[in-house]
Amino acid sequence: MRRALGSLGCCPALPFLLLLLLLLPPAARGSPHRLRRQPRPGGGSAGNLPAADTACKNRPLDLVFIIDSSRSVQPEEFEKVKIFLSKMIDTLDVGERTTRVAVMNYASTVKVEFPLRTYFDKASMKEAISHIEPLSAGTMTGLAIQTAMDEVFTEEMGTRPATFNIPKVVIVVTDGRPQDQVQDVAASARAAGVEIYAVGVDRADMQSLRVMASEPLDEHVFYVETYGVIEKLTSKFRETFCAANVCALGTHDCEQVCVSNGGSYLCDCYEGYTLNPDKRTCSAVDVCAPGRHECDQICVSNNGSYGCECYEGYILNPDKKTCSAMDMCAAGRHDCAQVCLSNDGSYSCDCFEGYTLNPDKKTCSAGDMCAPGRHDCEQVCVSDDLFYTCDCYQGYTLNPDKKTCSRTDACAPGTHDCEQVCVSNGGSYTCDCYEGFTLNPDEKTCSRAITSSLITTEESCKCEAIAALQDSVTSRLEALSTKLDEVSEKLQAYQGRQQAV
């Protein structure tokens, strides 16, 4: 379906608006404009920009014009196309950070007049457009679109990275029927994210325009009867690419932040605030609510922002978010009298060996090192404040291990006080003397004995009496032995008779 010029929404005031736009200084018509997220003092418009500039700023685009210069386009008609391009550029917010423009000229061959990276001001673009010459050959529209994809929509040629989310737009202007397979090429371009507008003039094939254009077709396909009125399409594209900045006009009712959205707007809030259900006013948020902060342990709200803290026994790490258990036994951090034992953010007290922990669990008292079970002495433990030594009972000596004891030789040199002979008796001893000496009454020392070769009468009588007694005893023993022999013989005879019977 062809769209006639009268259905493009033109109005009597359009020539005046276009003239006003052309008369504006370049800074007012083409300078970038960025909405800042800050309160609007007094509800007025942002800054002192002219109303015409703040009211209409086209969204940033990577825009490529593909113009047909085949033999069917007369030279004077081609000049009309160039005027159309120039006026289109006047309506755009051209700049390195706003809309970038490239122009391609095609017939049976394709020529990139200038890519997206070449010009960032309107005057230079319009000057370059004025020098474009027609190619005067066939109509290879598919080849032109493919060349745009291969040689113009690349970062090397000035297309911005996909992460910038800058729309890629193509406006094809033709008056004939494509002589190649434009359908598949256009479909691939659209699939790659390129938005295609098709402008047909005079003898243009409407079916081909619809095949190459993006959906919805009634917004992307245009037709004019002659090149003489093509420039009037400028107003339609201006409506398409240019959105009113309601936030700059000061006609919104957002309490804090206004975000322009095409010809409308949305309200937003400063950090630390949340948009109320009325979508206009804001309320302070609880930044320490679960899931809203990054604190490892404790979140402390502070007028729309927050800080992190840690539980007792922990210390905030340099990242100001996470916590680590501190050394509770570091000097000055505990009240243990002797030993501090750290335990994951807490601590307990202990004592040195030989001391016991008092009931207050902090101070220590010296213990009895010789108490049962506290030492390893075999016989005697001798306590010495914090230490102990082992000893042995009398008659025993401490072994080299300093713990066990062995029975001592009481007569070992230096261990007794006998003058001559020491006689050991278990763990004690007695003294004796050599032959010819007698033990003195002190039981320790000895004196030489007095001997004589003369035997007294009394001693002689004693010897005779002893000898007589010995003879008497011997005689009686012999008689007793004889009787025992007789008894033994009779006993044997008796036993013999018994056995015979």
Image: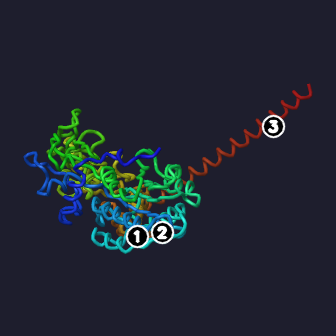
N-term mark: 1 or 3 = 1
Q: Which residue is mark 2?
A: 151
Q: Nearer the viewer, residue 203 or 495?
A: 203
Q: Which residue is mark 1?
A: 115
Its colouring scheme is rainbow
Q: What is the distance, in whole Å, between disc 1 and disc 3 at their CAs? A: 160 Å
- Picture residue at 35% right of the left edge, 46% below the top: 6
Q: How many marks?
A: 3
Q: Which residue is mark 3?
A: 489
* Above or below, 170 relative to 269: below
Measured as percent of width and height from the top left, residue 329 is found at 24, 54
Give the residue type at disc 1.
Pro
Q: Nearer the viewer, residue 350 or 216?
A: 216
Query: Do tag 1 and tag 2 residues touch (Cβ < 8 Å)?
Result: yes
Give the residue type at disc 3.
Glu
Give the residue type at disc 2.
Glu
Q: Neighbour class for label 1 at 10 Å: few (<14), some, many (≥20)?
A: many
- Considering the numbered disc 2 on the image, is that residue within a helix, a strand or a loop? helix
- Considering the numbered disc 1 on the image, is that residue within a helix, a strand or a loop? loop
Q: What is the distance, in whole Å, between disc 1 and disc 2 at their CAs? A: 9 Å
* Above or below, 54 relative to 7: below
Where, quadrant-wise, is the C terminus in this rendering?
top right
